[in-house]
Image: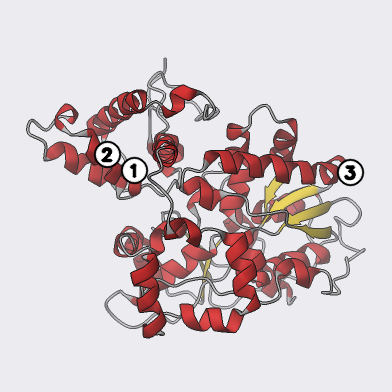
Amino acid sequence: MREGSLDAPVRHPLNWQDPEFYDEAKLDEELRRVFDICHGCRRCFNLCDSFPKLFDLVDEAGDEELEAVSSDKFGTVVDACTLCDLCFMTKCPYVPPHEFNLDFPHLMLRYRAVERKKGKTGGLAEQLVETDRNGKLAGLVAPLANWASDTNNGMTRGVLESVAGVHREAALPKFHGKTFAMRAKSDGITVNSAAPAAGKRKAVIYATCFVNYNNPSIGEAARRVLAHNGVETKVVYPSCCGMPQLEQGDVARVAATAAKVAAEMEAHIRDGWDIIALVPSCALMLKFEWPLLVPDNAQVKALAQSTFDISEYVVDISKRHGLADGLVALDGGVTLHIACHARAQNMGQKAAEMLRLIPGATVGVIERCSGHGGSWGVMKDNFEIALKVGKPVAKQAAQANRAYIASECPLAGEHIIQGMQRLDGAAPSVSHSTHPIELFARAYGL
């Protein structure tokens, strides 16, 4: 057995249908095995708040050993995990195929699944992540919903904090009355038949809940860029990928979602369509998490093999076919945050590669967690911690002082802006973040 991260990490399927998966004694035994290894290693001390909490528990115990820590305190470690996967992908020397067989994020997921089975989860926190239902309802009254969720609205945000536990200062996504899927039906986009990739590629854009309900401009930019490069596209949105439910430990529901979406995508894949996800978390689900939840589902496996992140897809077109003419420089440069779930896809810095295809591009990369963690970072108990975790990113972005702040994860991008606003000194000149595909569309003049 070779020590350290000398072999590529290998993830094992999550055996969530085995009764032993929910056995509390076996779970506690595995938690103690893994936590003891983490306590002795401590390489992940600066990744997120889970590890400092774990190490503090051990250090404050009577003999500074894990055996002195009561199991009922492990929940604080689990609650701090955002399932970013960075410990597994970038730090831990003991992930499979190492004989220690550590998968810290999936162990945290198992703990949450056990808590769910015991009836200890639920409530308003779970209602906040019902993205499809909330998106449809809020879209019907989008101006009112956006007014109520604005951080400057002290009255409504105070109520939201008291009732739902959402921190009153945390920026929340806006809603749109006309979804991305609706807009795609009448956007009038035509495919450039003179582009090098014309007639060679066609893609289904999986809208994702965030782009569909909260930021349709990302999808519109992707459609325009791909059409300009000769790629025929169509928008499909069966449902949310289930990442918000995975964070809550609802593994069975996510597995059902995987089977449902994969079945709907099967005909498109069979007809030669590529699948594109517009947000890294969703691409990660389709490519990696779903196959680990339903490893015997051939449709899920085929979908995983056919799925691209949007930045990855543009780079692939450039390498295989070449890009259409028309790119011009973006003045002022770009500070690009590489999202955790983009890094976890193990595909390299595709957003940076894409932006560097723009003539004269100045792209500064920040490859560190923003601290947001999906729905985790907006909660009252987590918001300040999330800003603390993301402070090094905010400082780097502020010091770079470039014209654009970009992140493949829109939530992370806005969280970075909030972190910059809290730094000492002048207010940041950039007031909002941009998705890299939007910048690429801007460079094309689209």
Residue 431 shows in the view: no
151 shown above or below 228: below
Pinpoint residue 198: horizontal percent, then vertical percent. 89, 57
Pinpoint residue 342: horizontal percent, then vertical percent. 55, 50
CA–CA distance between discs 3 and 1?
43 Å
Pinpoint residue 398: horizontal percent, then vertical percent. 38, 72
Pinpoint residue 303: horizontal percent, then vertical percent. 73, 40
State yes or no: discs 2 and 1 in contact (Cβ < 8 Å). yes
106 shown above or below 219: above
Q: Earlier in the sequence, mark 3 or mark 2?
A: 2
Q: Secondary structure at mark 2?
A: helix
296 or 352: nearer the eye? 296
Q: Secondary structure at mark 1?
A: helix
Amino acid type indicated by mark 2: Phe
Place residue 113 in its image quadrant: top left
| In this rendering, position of residue 58 left or right of residue 119 | left
Q: Which residue is mark 1?
A: 78
Q: Residues within 10 Å of mark 3 (few under 14, many from 20)?
A: few
4 or 283: nearer the eye? 283
Amino acid type indicated by mark 3: Asp
Q: Which residue is mark 2?
A: 74
State yes or no: discs 3 and 1 in contact (Cβ < 8 Å). no
In the rendered image, which quarter contains the N terminus?
top left
- What coloring was used for the rendering? secondary structure
Q: Residues within 10 Å of mark 1 (few under 14, many from 20)?
A: many
Residue 271's disc number:
3
Q: Secondary structure at mark 3?
A: loop
